[in-house]
Amino acid sequence: MSNEAETPAADGVKYRRIFLDLQRAISNGKYREGQRLPSEAQLTRMYSTSRMTVARALKELTILGIVERKPGSGSYVRHASATHGRSFGLLIPDLGETEIFEPICQGIARASRINHDEILWGAATRDVESKVQQALQLCNYYLSKYVAGIFFAPFEHTENGDAANREIVETLQRVSIPVVLLDRDVVRYPARSGCDLVGIDNRRAGYVVTQHLLKLGCQRIVFLALPNSAPTVAMRMAGYRDALCASHKPEAAEIGMPDSKEWVGKLLQAHRPDGIVCANDRTAGELMLTLNALGVDIPSAVRIVGIDDVKYASLLHVPLTTLRQPCNDLGAAALSTMVDRVDHPNMPARQVTLECELIVRKSCGAPVREDGTDSGE
């Protein structure tokens, strides 16, 4: 029996579900061009909803040119091919601040052209206080554009970031919009959300760079990260600990401000490190500038490694040894994962991980080629 007294919120969720289900069924070939769709009465019973809600979903399909409504006859598929080129939204709060996301987005855009898909971008802001509100507004904008799915890189270095990440994902899940997470999850390691995730094996990344310092003879290795970092940092820290445990070396993980001479001075005094694993290249870059200001020579006094291989890693005053993320390939993998999710909405959530490459430069003290870029292991 239909529910003619649905609340506006419930109506919006069911309308969106009906719209997406029919759009997906047409795209998959269940309903072909010229074929009649189930009647409004049938859809009302199928979804246990009001006739008004069903009519709204069919109206939106008509506006998009996918369905043609014939009075007294019903709704028919007009252009099945119209759904082959779908729209996807990019929700990247740290775009322009975290350098890995620009090439990842470029990889998504490049791969989307093959299937004639459209990628919608939203403007970014550097105002931390408005980031969360802007992201939620962007979600609503994407919904108004009938996107088939959203790529989301969760907040980090934001005090209320965890709550905002959950709110965004829950908002999209309520209206049956597929979400593919980029680089990081919306929950803290070792927990996993129910969303598809595309990134690198961050635990292995932490292990690889730590093991590299161990092979160079480091005895006192510190792991350094910024406050309010993404769950990926906890995974990298776990890999760092795995490597030290396997080598029977002491561990020392610090959360702090690498751009503070006072804080870094206390870290050096407390641990006397001969090697430092930085959670990412941003942390490494800030630390190296501070060490330079303190008169600490890199790599003779302390060896430094990072993770990501952002553009400026090779341009620091001591070129940074780091683990390179395959950003363009991550973008292509993200689009492939999204297409699979849209076409098969009930399959289990997946975590797609790509391999990284260790780029050896002068900051770790290992021999490098004459061009100073990479000697391998």
Image (cartoon, helix red, strand yellow):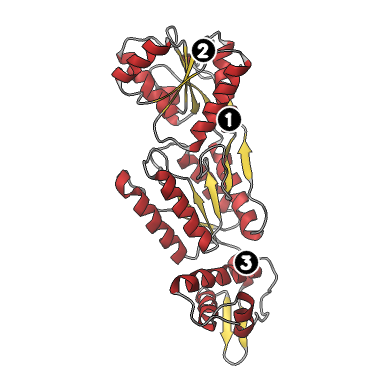
Q: Secondary structure at mark 3?
A: helix
Mark 3: give few (<14), some (14-19) or many (20+) Cα within 10 Å. many
Q: Do we see residue 375 in this rendering?
A: no
Q: Secondary structure at mark 2?
A: loop
Q: Pick the quarter of the image with the N terminus.
A: bottom right
Decide which of 42, 124 is in the foreground and name it. Answer: 42
Mark 1: give few (<14), some (14-19) or many (20+) Cα within 10 Å. some
Q: Which residue is mark 3?
A: 24
Type of amino acid under label 2: Glu
Residue at image location 40% in from the left, 36% down from the top: 228
Q: Which mark is residue 123?
A: none
Q: Which comes before the other along the chain, label 2 or label 3?
A: 3
Q: Which residue is mark 1?
A: 203
Q: Secondary structure at mark 1?
A: helix
Type of amino acid under label 3: Arg
Q: Which mark is residue 370?
A: 2
Q: Pick the quarter of the image with the C terminus.
A: top right
Q: Do we see residue 217 in this rendering?
A: yes
| Mark in the foreground, 1 or 3 | 1
Image location (x, y in percent) of residue 307: 50, 27
From the viewer's perspective, tell me whether residue 294 is left or right of residue 92. Answer: left
Type of amino acid under label 1: Arg
Image vertical order of residue 207 relative to residue 174, above or below: above
Mark 2–mark 1 Cα distance, whole angstroms, equals 31 Å
Q: Is there CB contact under 8 Å for labels 1 and 3?
A: no
Image location (x, y in percent) of residue 153: 48, 45
Decide which of 62, 208 is in the foreground and name it. Answer: 208
Mark 1–mark 3 Cα distance, whole angstroms, equals 36 Å
Q: Which comes before the other along the chain, label 2 or label 1?
A: 1
Decide which of 192, 70 is in the foreground and name it. Answer: 192
Mark 2–mark 3 Cα distance, whole angstroms, equals 55 Å
